[in-house]
Amino acid sequence: MDNTGVVLLVAAIAGSVFLLWVILYFIPIGLWFQALVSDVKISLLQLILMRWRKVPPTIIVGAMIEGKKAGIELYRDLLEAHYLAGGHVAQVVHALVSASKANIDLTFQIATAVDLAGRDVFEAVQMSVNPKVINTPPVSAVAKDGIQLIAKARVTVRANIKRLVGGAGEETILARVGEGIVSSIGSSDSHKAVMENPDFISKVVLDKGLDSGTAFEILSIDIADIDVGKNIGAGLQIDQADADLKIAQAKAEERRAMAIAREQEMKALAQEMKAKVIEAEAHVPLAMAEAFRSGNLGVMDYYRMKNIEADTQMRETIAKPEDKKKRTDKLV
């Protein structure tokens, strides 16, 4: 056999293999036989059409076989529609089987709606069977006596299948539990009462119905830890006292400034009066000169006046204490 014959033989074998692969890809005989022996009624034509509809037959047939073995009736059209809508067919079927075994009322419609809503429906069913524990972050609250308490809680929740669509998530549960802890501690007269009986917080918070409108059912709220924080009341009193002190100091400084201003005004007024006195004394010699010229004042009258002034000055000097005399002498 020449080289041309060898090439043709290899090409024929390769073409046959490729053609067989194409046939088996578009006509999944093995998958059809698997469905047949599993008592799942699906025609070979439907499997071929799934390929053309861009739906993996393996996923649909596998889901139908799993549902058949679990006693759940599933319809091919609904499974294909859920896949084309962007859903997770395998997760939905797993959830339906788990719910059936656990006697949980879960329909195909609810399961697909939960899956398309972005929630893991299989995990939700597992959480319904095995409740989940959520640890809250540290929550700070202040009792009526001004002492800060820092509490941590463990919230045991179970998924509520009927409220998975449109129900609030874990963040809402944590926020509501934190609000309830703050409210219950804030209503306590003393932090000691809370420390002695932390179950009081759990009962108050649990009675508030915090799981309303959420996708979960709160089974229990347990206070894991309570720590004493700062004395907020004393700190507020200190801050208030500091503020009052600053206000008092500001008012005192204001009064001091007003007193200094008043003192300066009085000094200016005294200088003004002294100036008036000096001005008045300056008119005395002029008046005396006028009296001399007019003849109303004689020379003897002038001497008598001077004698009286000298006598008065001598008496004042004698009446002064010694220290004042010395100062007067120095001035003289």
Image (spheres, grey):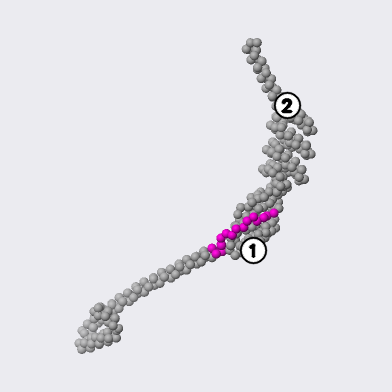
Q: Looking at the picture, does residue 326 appear above or below residue 136?
A: below
Which one is nearer the viewer's eye here, 127 or 282?
Answer: 127
Quadrant housing residue 234: bottom right
Q: Which residue is mark 1?
A: 193
Measured in 3D between alpha carbons, the distance from the residue under mark 1 to the one under mark 2, in whole angstroms, is: 75 Å
Residue at 67% across, 17% down: 12
The amino acid sitting under disc 2 is Ile
Residue at 69% across, 36% down: 84
Q: Looking at the picture, does residue 203 appear above or below residue 122?
A: below
Which one is nearer the viewer's eye here, 46 or 216?
Answer: 216
Badge 1 crowding class, 10 Å Cα cut-off, few under 14, some 14 to 19, many 20 or more, is few
Badge 2 crowding class, 10 Å Cα cut-off, few under 14, some 14 to 19, many 20 or more, is some
Quadrant containing the C terminus in the rendered view: bottom left
Please report the bounds of the magenta region as a residue range.
220-236
Residue at 74% across, 29% down: 31
- Give x and y (percent) for residue 280: 28, 79
Q: Looking at the picture, does residue 328 appear above or below residue 110?
A: below
Q: Which mark is residue 170?
A: none
Q: Is residue 187 visible?
A: no
The tag earlier along the polypeptide, 1 or 2, is 2
- Give x and y (percent) for residue 17: 68, 21
Report helix, strand or loop for mark 1: helix
| Residue 11 lies in the magenta stretch | no
The amino acid sitting under disc 1 is Ala
- Give x and y (percent) for residue 240: 52, 65
Prevailing SS of the magenta stretch: strand
- Give x and y (percent) for residue 226: 62, 58
Quadrant housing residue 296: bottom left
Quadrant housing residue 14: top right
